[in-house]
Each structure stands twice: as C-alpha cells, then as structure tokens.
Amino acid sequence: MVSGCILTMDPLRPQAEAFVTLGDRVAFVGTREEALSVAGSGVREIRFDEGAVLPGLIDSHNHMLWTGVQRTQANLAGCKSIKDLLAALRKYAVAHPEREWIVSGAGWHVETLAEKRYPTRHELDGVSGNQPVYLPRVGHAAAVNSEALRRAGIGRDTDDPKGGRIERDENGDPTGLLLEPPAFNLVGRLVPPLSRHERRQALLEVQKAYHAVGICGIIDPGLGPEDMAIYEELCRERRLTVRSVIMPLAQTHDDPDRVIADLRAWGVRTGFGNEWLKLGGIKVYLDGGASLGTALMREPYPDEKCQCGIQVTHTDTFHRIVELCASTGWSIGVHTVGGKAIDIALAVFEDVNRRYPIKDLRFSLIHAYLWPSRENIDTARRLNVGVATQASMQFQFAPLLVRRFGKDLVGRATPVKSWIDGGITVGGGSDSPVTPYQPLLGIWHAVTRHVDALGTSIGSDEAISAEQALTMYTRNSAWLSFSDQERGMIRPGMLADWVALSDNPLEVDPMGLREINVTATAVGGAIVHNG
Ligand SMILES: [Zn+2]
C-alpha cells in the first residue's frame, strides 16, 4: 500500500490518499482509511508525507539502447568550442588505444560550440595517429577525419549518394561533413559495432539511470533486428525493468520492393508482445532535422537559397509502406520535422484511409515541430493521428533556430498547446540521446517555454499547464504505447508503475519543476529506485 498525495491522472478520480497493490497491479484506490481496511492488518505501507505520487512516467520517443551504447563512447556533451571537442577526443584516444575507431556519443551540438560549425576533417586529423574518427550527430549528420574518408573511398570525384550530401569546400574536396544517412553511412557502416554482449550490458545499465529520473516505460523508435533481439533477450530473462515498446525501422534507402516484402513477411504486427516488451508501429523517416537544415520545409530556408531540406523517403515508397501498414494492422510512426514533411505524411494517411481505415491504428507524427498548420491539426484529429513531441528539443535547439528563422517563428515551433487544443493526443518524450532524457526537464520546458541560453521564454502562447504536461508523460504516452488499458494512470486493474516526487508538480512554482527530485520509482509494484 502506498499513501500520500496521489495524483492518479485518472479523470474519474484525479486525487486519492492511497492505493493498494496486489502482485504487479493496482487493486484499490481511495482514502487512506479505506485502503487500510481493504488491505487488512499487516499490510506494508509506504508513506510519502511530502510531494506527490504519480503513475510511472513514459517517454514516447527515447532511443534507450542507443542512449546506453553512447555512454560507452567519447563523450562530447558539454564541449563549448572546437578546441574543447578536439581535446576531449584526444583524451579519449589516449585512454582507449585498443579502439580501432574513435566514435563519439550523441548529446553534443554544434549550436553549443563557440564556432557554431562542425570540425573539419583537417582539425580531426590532429586528434589521433591514424585512427579513423567518426562523430555522428542526431542521426542526420556526421563529421569524420581524412582517414575515415579514405577508408570509405570518399574523394573529390565521389558523387553525392541519393538522399544525402557530401559537403565540399570551394575546391570541391570533401570537408569531412556528411549529411543524412546515405552519406554518413558510407563511413558509419565501416565502424565495427559494439559486441552483442557490450550492447546488452549497455541496455541493462541505462535502465537504472532511467528509473532514477522516474521513467517506467519508453518507446524505442527505429530499431533493426539485432537491437530488437537484445530487447527480447532481456525480456525473456526478466531483466527488462523499463517497459519497452519497440518500433522496427523501415530502411527506406534500400530497394522499396524489398522493404515491403520484408514487412509483409513478418506475420506479427503492432501490439504483439506483453506488458514488458511490445511491438509498436513501423518507424519511417520522411525528412531530416531542423538544427541541421535538412528538415523538409514548405519554403526555402532563409539562409540557403533554393534549399528546402531533404526528403529522406520518396513519397511513392512512403505511400506503399503506409498502405501496407493500414491493410495489415501495423501502426506507423513517421519522423516529420518540417511542415512540408507533415503535409506529405498526412496527405498520404488521408489517401490510404479511404481504402483502409486507420483510425484504430494510432498512426503518429514524430517531432512535427516546424509549424504544423491549422489544417494539419484538423486532419490529424479526424484520422486519430497522435503526436510524439519533445519539449527538450525546443529547449536545446531554439538558440540556433532563432538565428536562422527569427524569434517569432521559433516561438511557434513545437506548438504543443495548439495540438492539444485541437484534440490531438500528444505524448511527451525526449529523443534521448539527442536531448536529455529527464522527464521533469521536458515537463518544466513544456510549462515555462523557458530557454536558458536565450534567458527568456519563447512562444509562451504554446505553453501548457503542469497537469497537461504530466498527462503527456503518462496517459498520452501510454496511448502512443498501445498500453493505455494498463498504464498511464493509477487505477484498479492497471499495472502498479508509480513514481514518488519530492514536490507536488501541480503546486510548485513552474520554474521549479525541473528541480523536483524523484524519491522512489516502482515498476509492477517492485521498487526499482530509491533516492
Ligand atoms: Zn529520435
């Protein structure tokens, strides 16, 4: 039995004094007196005199396995200049002479470097002897050194691969910056992967870090077969403690016929699994990233003549995948950042919906933040399309975007309130390791829209209440996880996933939301973190 200020997130009974768990489920929710009489004498009561207890938090867009893996790589987060970054790499190279390649983890950003640019291959050449250096960033770009280019056979005569770009200097020589997967995969595919054992260990370890910040569930988007197998293995061994919904990646750079045939051959679909591990929707990338200038826009970027970004998946291929999903019971989550990508995704959904209704499949837009239109919001509501949003993205990238687009437009990015007012189910999340995974940081930003680097709030019109922000990270993310019958609320019959916070998020000053500590986390009634 747990007692204290219980914020159940259940609209039928938003507040309670206590709940009783039986096995891994909630058996009763009510007053403390009722709970004591239901539970009977001898019940173990965990009492929280301060703060509040909520349903376990769910991150609807979190690359948990990748986050675990990148913790083993060169950590460039916090580098403030290219000099810093080169020094961190040199230190890593000295500490890890056994590594054939020097690879960075995610979580570093060009915007936070004083120079506001990527290091060139010549700068990176000074980092190590002849080890190749590969610095991938956000899944849309990578900076590499000359040795890496040499090994990949990329030279001045190499054509840009379809859907990607090899950046060149004024002489036509590659600078070392490779944009979008078709380009950076030319190098990335040469990097020896961590062993299966190392990856498995990384996933095991990162779960503890997640519990410490209140995360009980995630959706891990865009996994390949080997990654899914690692999840499956941990689940089978009962060592998965973060409930995971995994989204298989449709590799749309490959031959579309093969992609379709592969998906068709699987024989399973969204929802397959159990309360620990479940198949979510198929993940497809439609465009690039906002901070990289590769998000697909309706109009050219102000600072790049005639450039509207990159469409990563051809509309025909995308259409075929959506139709396959709709006709076989798969959901789909589409990476769309720019408005044009959002337009294309929804137009295709609408078209396919005429033949195969998609309403029950909970299709979703992932990110969807550079200016969804009024019409986009209406279409999404009609088709029951959800949105996986990341407040922390705005927090992180606003400074760069402001320089590119101006403050007014950037204030309207990630229009969470417009989505919610428009009747859309919006799930909260982080896109870790791209931005930090702490849910309370995301909740704080969604409520305040404050950006430290700008020293001000940006787009206050799109700020939401603390209760709405909590709903995003509980009920709504559970909905996007196809698990809203079991998670996202503290209600009898639901899984006993809960988190105790040092302060009541509905009562603290909004600027203090990110200061709240997680005092305890439980998954299926078992305490997994005790702070
Ligand atoms: Zn992502």
Image: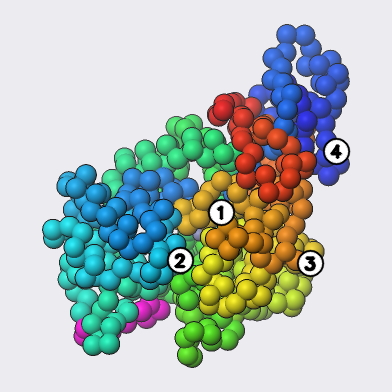
Whether residues under marks 1 and 4 lie with C-beta atoms below 8 angstroms apart, the answer is: no
**Which three-letter amino acid code belongs to the residue tagged 1?**
Ser
Report the side of 512 relative to 145 (left or right).
Answer: right
Give the main secondary structure, helix, strand or loop, of the magenta stretch.
Answer: loop
Of 173 and 427, the residue lying toward us: 173
| Residue at the spot of label 3 | 422
Disc sitting over residue 13 in the figure: 4
Residue 211 sits in which quadrant?
A: top right
Residue 338 in the image: x percent, y percent? 57, 75
Q: Is residue 350 above or below residue 270?
A: below
Q: Secondary structure at mark 3?
A: loop
Q: Residue at x 57, y 78 (%)?
A: 405
Q: Residue at x 66, y 70 (%)?
A: 411
Disc sitting over residue 430 in the figure: 1
Q: Residue at x 64, y 55 (%)?
A: 445
**Which three-letter amino acid code belongs to the residue tagged 2?**
Glu
Report the side of 224 relative to 143 (left or right).
Answer: right
